[in-house]
Image (spheres, grey):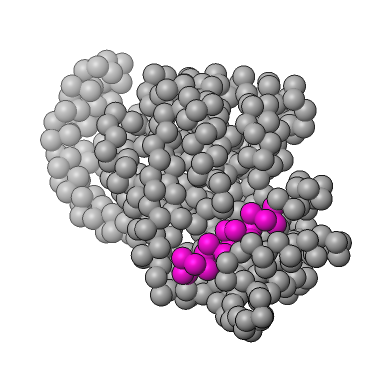
């Protein structure tokens, strides 16, 4: 009714003629008025034309004003950083400390994996470390032979590790395991490279290339399994380190796979509890932290095969003696380093010019700080005797007692 009253004055102004009178008389038959109003609409083009011109100017202003909403887009970009609920540990997941809690987690994970994957196949790069091993064991329990594991031996693993991976997963767990010995390929690429960062990049790229080559040979696989754990996600969000996910693969492969990460909400201690409940060997479950580039960063400087073997053999002796002394599982991390320099010595009455072996044993909670483990003299004496007598090319043993800071845990 208000609109009609407002249109009447307009009608009166627009009606210099007496024809406006019928408009007044037409108050009752509203429908007829609408029909009679049609001619008025014909006259409207003149009125519409004016607004059309005027509307162009406002349109331009509107376009300028519309720009600010585009500036508001960053808010949309920020959403994914906080939005992925899939990357937030559920509050309902209590800290796993007991076998019973581990069994409950395993049962729930098996159901989730089967629901996600169905009867499809999953591809997994199996390093033999705690995280990837527990991930593999969970996937085997859930989908059996539909898991395809690829173990790449880059020649930088510790003594006995490739053999253990094959024994545990192929022979004991009956997994479908593809073993690739790429030792020569990696060491040829690393020949003469002294810079630690260049070594790391070469090792990382070559590993991805080898894995990608194998993945392209396999048909009908849509899922990629990964041993991502919760600290990886937290450190990635904090910018401490890049999250090691499918982003490293070539685009054609990255687009092909969907991720399966059954232990992504677990901390390292929880992963060990679950691994033990899954029946993995104690020395695999309790494996100490090991760098991605492996022994490549413990063979300081340009890697040579003879010095790399000295690292591998001395490390094996260290682990064996720590086990005998009851220190395995109590000391957070322990390993040997062979620097790229020599010193004089004497053996069987003859002058030698060989490498030193450096023993590094430290304790830490999260690797941001570390303190050296005080070793008993009897243990140091045994280690020195064994290493200098059993490891070819070594004539000296040193102990690194530097905390972090000022030193990093690894030498490179």
Q: Quadrant of residue 132?
A: top right
Say whether residue 172 is left or right of residue 91.
left
| Residue 53 vertical placement versus 223 (above, below) | below
**Residue that extends furthest to the front in the rendered view of this protein:** 349
- Residue 344 % position (x, y): 64, 84
- Report whether residue 31 is seen: yes
Location of the C terminus (image quadrant): bottom right
- Residue 176 % position (x, y): 41, 29
In the image shown, does 2 or 52 lie closer to the viewer?
Answer: 52
- Say which residue appears at 24% left-offset and 27% top-offset: 23
| Residue 100 vertical placement versus 160 (above, below) | above
- Report whether residue 67 is seen: no
Q: Quadrant of residue 204?
A: bottom left
| Residue 2 vertical placement versus 323 (above, below) | above
Say whether residue 286 is left or right of residue 248.
right
In the image shown, does 17 or 344 lie closer to the viewer?
Answer: 344
In the image shown, does 77 or 137 lie closer to the viewer?
Answer: 137
Magenta range is 303-319
Location of the N terminus (image quadrant): top left
- Say which residue appears at 62% left-offset and 67% top-offset: 337
In the image shown, does 31 or 89 lie closer to the viewer?
Answer: 89
- Say which residue appears at 58% left-offset and 63% top-offset: 311
Q: Quadrant of residue 273?
A: top right
Say whether residue 124 is left or right of residue 16.
right
- Residue 87 % position (x, y): 57, 40
- Asked if the magenta segment contains residue 353, the reply would be no
- Say which residue appears at 24% left-offset and 50% top-offset: 51
């Amino acid at each position: 009714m208000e609109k009609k009253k407002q249109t009447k004055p307009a009608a009166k102004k627009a009606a210099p003629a007496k024809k406006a009178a019928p408009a007044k008389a037409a108050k009752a038959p509203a429908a007829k008025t609408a029909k009679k109003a049609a001619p008025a609409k014909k006259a409207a083009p003149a009125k519409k034309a004016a607004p059309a011109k005027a509307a162009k100017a406002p349109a331009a202003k509107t376009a300028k004003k519309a720009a600010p909403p585009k500036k508001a887009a960053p808010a949309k970009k920020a959403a994914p950083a906080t939005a992925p609920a899939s990357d937030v540990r559920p509050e309902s997941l209590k800290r796993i400390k007991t076998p019973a809690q581990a069994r409950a987690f395993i049962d729930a994970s098996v159901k989730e994996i089967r629901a996600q994957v169905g009867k499809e196949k999953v591809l997994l790069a199996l390093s033999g470390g705690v995280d990837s091993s527990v991930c593999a064991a969970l996937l085997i329990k859930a989908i059996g032979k539909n898991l395809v594991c690829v173990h790449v031996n880059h020649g930088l693993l510790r003594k006995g590790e490739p053999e253990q991976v094959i024994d545990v997963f192929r022979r004991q767990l009956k997994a479908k395991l593809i073993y690739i010995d790429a030792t020569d390929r990696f060491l040829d690429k690393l020949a003469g490279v002294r810079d630690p960062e260049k070594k790391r990049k070469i090792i990382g790229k070559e590993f991805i290339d080898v894995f990608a080559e194998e993945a392209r040979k396999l048909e009908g696989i849509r899922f990629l399994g990964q041993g991502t754990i919760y600290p990886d996600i937290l450190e990635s969000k904090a910018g401490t380190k890049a999250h090691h996910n499918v982003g490293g693969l070539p685009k054609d492969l990255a687009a092909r796979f969907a991720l399966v990460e059954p232990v992504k909400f677990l901390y390292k201690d929880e992963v060990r509890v679950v691994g033990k409940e899954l029946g993995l060997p104690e020395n695999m479950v309790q494996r100490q932290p090991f760098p991605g580039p492996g022994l490549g960063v413990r063979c300081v400087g340009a890697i040579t095969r003879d010095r790399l073997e000295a690292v591998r053999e001395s490390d094996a002796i260290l682990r064996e003696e720590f086990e005998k002394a009851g220190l395995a599982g109590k000391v957070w991390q322990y390993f040997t380093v062979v620097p790229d320099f020599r010193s004089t010595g004497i053996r069987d009455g003859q002058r030698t010019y060989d490498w030193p072996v450096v023993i590094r044993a430290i304790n830490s909670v999260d690797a941001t700080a570390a303190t050296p483990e005080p070793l008993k003299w009897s243990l140091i004496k045994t280690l020195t005797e064994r290493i200098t007598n059993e490891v070819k090319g070594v004539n000296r043993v040193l102990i690194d007692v530097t905390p972090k800071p000022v030193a990093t845990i690894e030498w490179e």
